[in-house]
Amino acid sequence: MKLVVLKFGGTSVADVPQIKKIALKIKAEVKKDNKVIAVVSAMSGVTNNLIDQVKKTSENFSYSEYDTVVSSGEQVTSALLAIALEELSIKARSWLGWQVPIFTDDIYGKAVIKNIETENISKSLENGFVAIVSGFQGVSNNNRITTLGRGGSDTSAVALAAAFSADRCDIFTDVDGVYTTDPRIVKDAKKLDYVTYEEMLELASQGAKVLQTRSVALAMKYSINLRVLSSFEDLPGTFIIKEGHSMEKFEISGIAHSLNEAKITISGVPDRPGQAAEVFGALADSSINVDMIVQSSPINHESTDITFTIQETDLLEAEEIIKSIQRNIGFRKFTSETNVVKISVIGNAMRTQSGMAKTMFETLAKNQINIHVISTSEIKISVLISSDYYELAMRSLHTAFGLDK
Ligand code: ASP
Ligand code: MG
């Protein structure tokens, strides 16, 4: 007898007819003699709506109340799905985060799972019930409801799969898998049959939205048998696997883009130790996440320029911080820009194959696309370019790396 975790996203539980279809899918698993833990999102649009209502009520709300409001969408879908299963004569019950319980820290709005108690659900599964768990939510030490950040139901599912040592964790969504790039932008984008955890981690964190980044990190840590597949079509989807399994023949696996980037350049920074520490220390103190960083080489040991990128939503705060340290550091000026996009090419093969950077930069040059900032990791090259050219960049890179086929 196998234990499977099946996660259904917002579009898969968008209305009652959809929920009834999902119930049939779960019934099929039960008939195969599998124990099933199903994890559900809120109906699509519901979470956004709840967040709007909180924001309309106050500009200065407490995040513990915010979590109590925004977690409610998942409460509805979990119980509706349990009812739909009972309608099919399948024993099922809904579980809210605190009923499992799924313990988290108390960073409301983006809580981290600390521990999942398996006893209650295990008993229920033994008694032949399907467990339908509300995704996205947990409970803090202070006995308050928490949520795991947007897209957090993926993380709920993977964490449950880890806690219960599930045989597999299937993430059902509205696309049939992970693509080489965004098919809305590049019409020749291809579905990948396999992608490694590390590639998926880079794809997710560089802007591909199919899985919450944290869920991929967790899946990698616990070697979860993870798959992304369509809840509307009966197709195998994309398996997320360890390195070393049979891989695609492509040089790279995917091209991701991230639109909400902002670039800041600080010019005329005195060339002496401690300046970068002061800039990035001040940003870190305000929990502003810095992504790409370049510092120019100083001419005659006089001054340097430091350029870096952050999330666009942090820009106003970052500008205030930089103004506040200008006098202390004594830099000449700073400028910021928001019409920039980060494009990343990602692939395990980069570890061993040379010439990836060459292909990337030559392709951009051929298309007259200027590069503002470059950063790399073992399996990724990212460039920051003007937002006017990002679609052209994605299409031409997709072709240049042989992904169009
Ligand atoms: N409903 C939550 C959201 O929209 C969690 C999820 O769907 O994963 O972010
Ligand atoms: Mg999602």
Image (spheres, grey):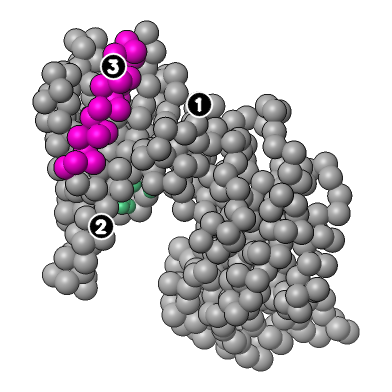
Mark 1 highlights which residue?
Answer: 225
Nearest to viewer (mark 2 / mark 3): 3
Mark 2 highlights which residue?
Answer: 45
Chief secondary structure of the magenta portion:
helix
Q: Which residues are magenta?
A: 16-37
Badge 3 density bin: few <14, some 14–19, many ≥20, Cα 10 Å: some
Is the shortest distance between ligand 1 and the CB of mark 3 under 8 Å? no
Mark 3 highlights which residue?
Answer: 30
- The image shows residue 52, relative to residue 23, as above or below, that is below
Would you say the residues marked 2 and 1 are in contact, meaning their CB atoms lie under 8 Å apart? no
Q: Is residue 227 left or right of residue 380?
A: left
Q: Is residue 299 left or right of residue 335?
A: right
The image quadrant that residue 349 belongs to is top right
- Along the viewing direction, whichever of 183 and 109 lies nearer the viewer: 183
The local secondary structure at tag 3 comes to helix
Residue drawn at point x = 25 percent, y = 57 percent:
45
Residue 338 at x, y percent in the picture: 53, 80
Tell me, yes or no, whether the highlighted magenta stretch contains residue 138.
Answer: no
Q: CA distance from mark 2 to mark 3?
A: 30 Å
Q: Is residue 114 left or right of residue 217?
A: left
Tell me, yes or no, whether the highlighted magenta stretch contains residue 26.
Answer: yes
